[in-house]
Amino acid sequence: MGDGDHIIAQYYGQHLDGEFTMPEDANNYRLELLNINNKKIRFFSCYLAPAAVMQAIKIAEPVTNRLLHVHDDTKSAGKEMVVLRQRVPNETFELSEMADQYYLRIPADRLNDEEEIHSIAEQAYKALRDRQSFDEPFNWRMTAHEVVLARSICQNVFQGEK
């Protein structure tokens, strides 16, 4: 989109992933899902990033445990856990220098519910425990002031504290 939200370029994709070139004079963009003979669609998430970034990483996001795993083969080993409030569509977050990063989504309306946060953290902990060992400790990172309590509760669960 250019000035005044006028369309200056369009890209149509028919797959779950794809690339497009953002015009230099664009100052905004819009993504739309087109319904072509579909009865129903369940939209879960969308990742928009420079193509070079997306080609270097693998993303796994099981719907059941609110846990997003980003793995980058080009970076050094290490684990990082980031507690996120539910992201709004125009928010971004920076990938760190860690090869493995885990993002735990906690809905904003549950950030003050310690029992709910504890339950979400335990589900994520079980999902991670089932997949791998915890030989290396997690490095913790948070993106917003409002997740301090959630981070503390989750860290206690992941470190086995009561």
Image: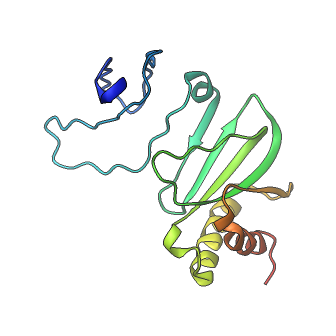
Residue 135 placement (x, y as % from top left): 86, 56
Q: Residue furthest front?
A: 4
Position of residue 64 relative to residue 118, above or below, is above
Q: Quadrant of residue 35?
A: top left
What residue sits 47% from the left and 57% below the top?
63
- Is residue 1 visible in this depiction of the protein? no
Q: As drawn, is 30 to the left or to the right of 101?
A: left
Residue 15 placement (x, y as % from top left): 35, 29
Position of residue 55 relative to residue 63, above or below, is above
What residue sits 63% from the left and 48% below the top?
69
Viewer-side residue, 56 vs 113: 113
Q: Quadrant of residue 51?
A: top right
Position of residue 19 relative to residue 160, above or below, is above
Q: Quadrant of residue 8?
A: top left
Position of residue 143 relative to residue 35, above or below, is below
Q: Residue furthest left?
A: 37
- State which quarter of the image contains the N terminus: top left
